[in-house]
Image (cartoon, helix red, strand yellow):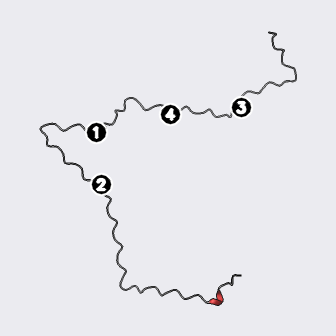
Amino acid sequence: RAPAPPAPPWRVPAPPAPPWRVPVPPALPPAPPWRAPVPSAPPPAPPWRAPAPPAPPRRAPAPPALPPALPWRAPAPPAPPWKASSLPVLP
Protein backbone atom coordinates (compact mmCIF):
# COMPACT_ATOMS: atom_id res chain seq x y z
CA ARG A 1 0.00 0.00 0.00
CA ALA A 2 1.44 3.35 -0.96
CA PRO A 3 1.86 5.97 1.80
CA ALA A 4 -0.64 8.83 1.79
CA PRO A 5 0.57 11.89 -0.08
CA PRO A 6 1.47 14.93 2.02
CA ALA A 7 -1.26 17.50 2.61
CA PRO A 8 -1.43 20.15 -0.10
CA PRO A 9 0.03 23.51 0.91
CA TRP A 10 -3.33 25.33 0.64
CA ARG A 11 -4.99 23.11 3.25
CA VAL A 12 -5.24 25.09 6.52
CA PRO A 13 -4.91 22.89 9.62
CA ALA A 14 -7.92 22.83 11.94
CA PRO A 15 -7.57 25.30 14.82
CA PRO A 16 -7.37 23.93 18.37
CA ALA A 17 -10.48 23.86 20.54
CA PRO A 18 -11.39 27.36 21.75
CA PRO A 19 -10.53 28.09 25.40
CA TRP A 20 -14.06 29.27 26.24
CA ARG A 21 -15.45 25.76 26.03
CA VAL A 22 -16.61 24.86 29.56
CA PRO A 23 -15.77 21.25 30.43
CA VAL A 24 -18.73 19.01 31.24
CA PRO A 25 -18.84 18.28 34.99
CA PRO A 26 -18.51 14.60 35.90
CA ALA A 27 -21.58 12.63 36.94
CA LEU A 28 -22.55 12.63 40.59
CA PRO A 29 -20.72 9.96 42.61
CA PRO A 30 -22.75 7.00 43.90
CA ALA A 31 -24.20 7.09 47.38
CA PRO A 32 -21.52 6.66 50.07
CA PRO A 33 -21.24 3.08 51.39
CA TRP A 34 -21.32 4.15 55.03
CA ARG A 35 -25.04 4.97 54.85
CA ALA A 36 -26.81 2.12 56.65
CA PRO A 37 -29.83 0.84 54.71
CA VAL A 38 -33.21 1.65 56.22
CA PRO A 39 -34.82 -1.54 57.58
CA SER A 40 -38.01 -2.40 55.74
CA ALA A 41 -39.76 -3.85 58.81
CA PRO A 42 -39.26 -2.99 62.49
CA PRO A 43 -37.45 -5.64 64.56
CA PRO A 44 -39.72 -8.08 66.41
CA ALA A 45 -40.63 -7.13 69.97
CA PRO A 46 -38.78 -9.01 72.73
CA PRO A 47 -40.80 -11.92 74.21
CA TRP A 48 -41.27 -10.28 77.59
CA ARG A 49 -42.73 -7.13 76.06
CA ALA A 50 -46.39 -6.94 75.12
CA PRO A 51 -46.82 -6.31 71.39
CA ALA A 52 -47.63 -2.72 70.51
CA PRO A 53 -51.16 -2.10 69.24
CA PRO A 54 -51.43 -1.41 65.52
CA ALA A 55 -51.17 2.24 64.57
CA PRO A 56 -54.53 3.84 63.78
CA PRO A 57 -55.03 4.68 60.11
CA ARG A 58 -54.07 8.23 59.26
CA ARG A 59 -57.20 10.20 58.42
CA ALA A 60 -57.06 13.66 57.02
CA PRO A 61 -58.82 16.17 59.30
CA ALA A 62 -62.19 17.23 57.97
CA PRO A 63 -62.21 20.83 56.74
CA PRO A 64 -64.21 23.15 58.98
CA ALA A 65 -67.73 23.85 57.77
CA LEU A 66 -68.38 27.28 56.33
CA PRO A 67 -69.87 29.65 58.91
CA PRO A 68 -73.53 30.52 58.39
CA ALA A 69 -74.34 33.78 56.66
CA LEU A 70 -74.24 36.77 58.96
CA PRO A 71 -77.79 37.70 59.98
CA TRP A 72 -77.23 41.46 59.59
CA ARG A 73 -75.87 41.16 56.05
CA ALA A 74 -78.65 41.92 53.59
CA PRO A 75 -78.82 39.57 50.60
CA ALA A 76 -77.52 40.96 47.33
CA PRO A 77 -80.27 42.33 45.08
CA PRO A 78 -81.01 40.30 41.95
CA ALA A 79 -79.25 41.39 38.78
CA PRO A 80 -81.38 43.76 36.67
CA PRO A 81 -82.81 42.21 33.51
CA TRP A 82 -81.01 43.11 30.30
CA LYS A 83 -82.64 45.72 28.14
CA ALA A 84 -83.35 44.47 24.63
CA SER A 85 -82.20 47.77 23.12
CA SER A 86 -78.72 47.49 24.67
CA LEU A 87 -77.96 44.09 23.14
CA PRO A 88 -76.31 43.99 19.70
CA VAL A 89 -78.45 42.45 16.99
CA LEU A 90 -76.79 39.38 15.55
CA PRO A 91 -77.42 38.66 11.86
Name which quarter of the figure residue 17 lies in: top right
Q: Dots 3 and 1: beta carbons under 8 Å?
A: no
Nearer-the-camera pick, 35 or 81: 81
Q: Which residue is mark 4?
A: 28
For residue 41, the mark is: 1
Q: In what element is the residue under mark 4?
A: loop
**Mark sitting earlier along the chain (1/2):** 1
Which residue sits at x=36%, y=82%?
Answer: 70
Name which quarter of the figure residue 51 lies in: top left
**Mark sitting earlier along the chain (4/2):** 4
Name the kind of residue labelled 4 in the image. Leu
Q: Which residue is mark 3?
A: 18
Q: Is residue 62 above or below residue 37?
A: below
Q: Measured from the top left, where is residue 40 in percent x and y?
A: 31, 38
Name the kind of residue labelled 2 in the image. Arg
Disc number lying in front (4 or 1) = 1
Q: CA distance from mark 4 to mark 2?
A: 37 Å
Q: Is residue 78 left or right of residue 91?
A: left
**Mark sitting earlier along the chain (3/4):** 3
Q: Is residue 28 above or below residue 5?
A: below
